[in-house]
Image (tube, grey):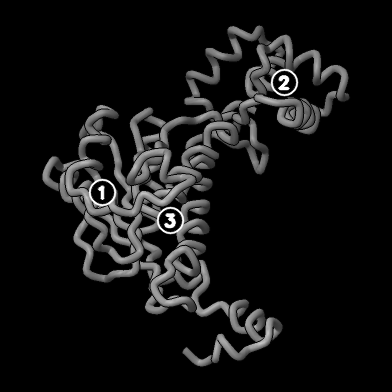
Amino acid sequence: MNIDYDNSSIPELINYFKKEEISLSNVINKNIIDVENLINDCTKRIINQNNIFLLGAGTSGRLAVIEAAELLPTYGDSTFKGIIAGGLEAMENSVEKSEDSLTESIKILNMNNIHNDDLVIGISSSGTTPYTISALNYCKSKKIQSCLISNTTKSKYDININLGVKTEKILDSTRMLSGTLTKQLLNLITTISMIKSGKTYKNFMISVKPLNNKLINRSIEIIAEITNLNTKKSEELFYKSGKNIKIAIVSYLKNMSFSESQALLDKNKGFLSRII
């Protein structure tokens, strides 16, 4: 520690805490092969409709659950499933003892019918959390693809990503730099996996679930931008297509019925870029 926290002013503390010792770029550069391999493995499972489990305890578990929860409305895909030690109660309240269980995570994976084509991504800043490591060891014994995101270089799984954080500015508070880097890394991995699985077209969210007025309006805007139709005609097309952006776009640009558009999308595994 190179600052006296107790006797520092708020501006001094802000200046200290804003300094970035490790960036996402640093993490990627040091783990580029593993990150690329993980994205490829995630992409395969999204396309083949297998499961990807994000699993952790405490902050790591909360990040896992948040990441998985955000993907369905954004990309219309439920491949990623978040698991946290202590269950959903641990999202709001501390259930710290749950991370010491050697059996609970394995039980949850089996309740979710895990199989050999699935992938488990464990998140553990220390690389030693029993809840997480027991799940990964179980996967390894069953020849299920496993990945560990941690701050250790001693991991032994199919994919091992080392964030490289040695000391947190509040000692051992891994919700800080480790948590920030983990969230950024998960964003990168899941987003690129969705892109390579055909869930986007250029930088448009063409698989978004129109679950509220904001997303309905955004869906109509996407149709208008890609087809060059005005808002009124795009809205009509959106509702006639069953609120399906891809079908709406293909049916208009290819002059097809909605059923023909769906069949063409199925033939191309949902990739709009292969059709228009």
Q: Residue furthest left?
A: 141
Residue situated in front as seen by the camera: 148 or 3: 3
Crowding at mark 1 (Cα within 10 Å: few <14, some 14-19, many 20+):
many
Q: Secondary structure at mark 1?
A: strand
Residue ID for mark 3: 59
Q: Quadrant of residue 44?
A: top left
Cα gap from disc 2 to disc 1, whole angstroms: 42 Å
What is the three-letter code of the residue carrying label 3?
A: Thr
219 with respect to 89 (left or right) = right
Q: Is residue 104 visible?
A: yes
Q: Is residue 43 visible?
A: no
Instruction: Give residue 146's mark.
Output: 1
Name the one closer to the observer, 104 or 135: 104
| Residue where numbered disc 2 is placed | 253
Q: Residues within 10 Å of mark 3 (few under 14, many from 20)?
A: many
Q: CA distance from mark 3 to mark 2?
A: 46 Å
Kindly identify the amino acid type of the residue bearing the numbered disc 1: Ser
Residue 186 x %, y %: 47, 52
Dot placed on the residue nearer the N-terminal end, 2 or 1: 1
Cβ atoms under marks 3 and 2 closer than 8 Å: no
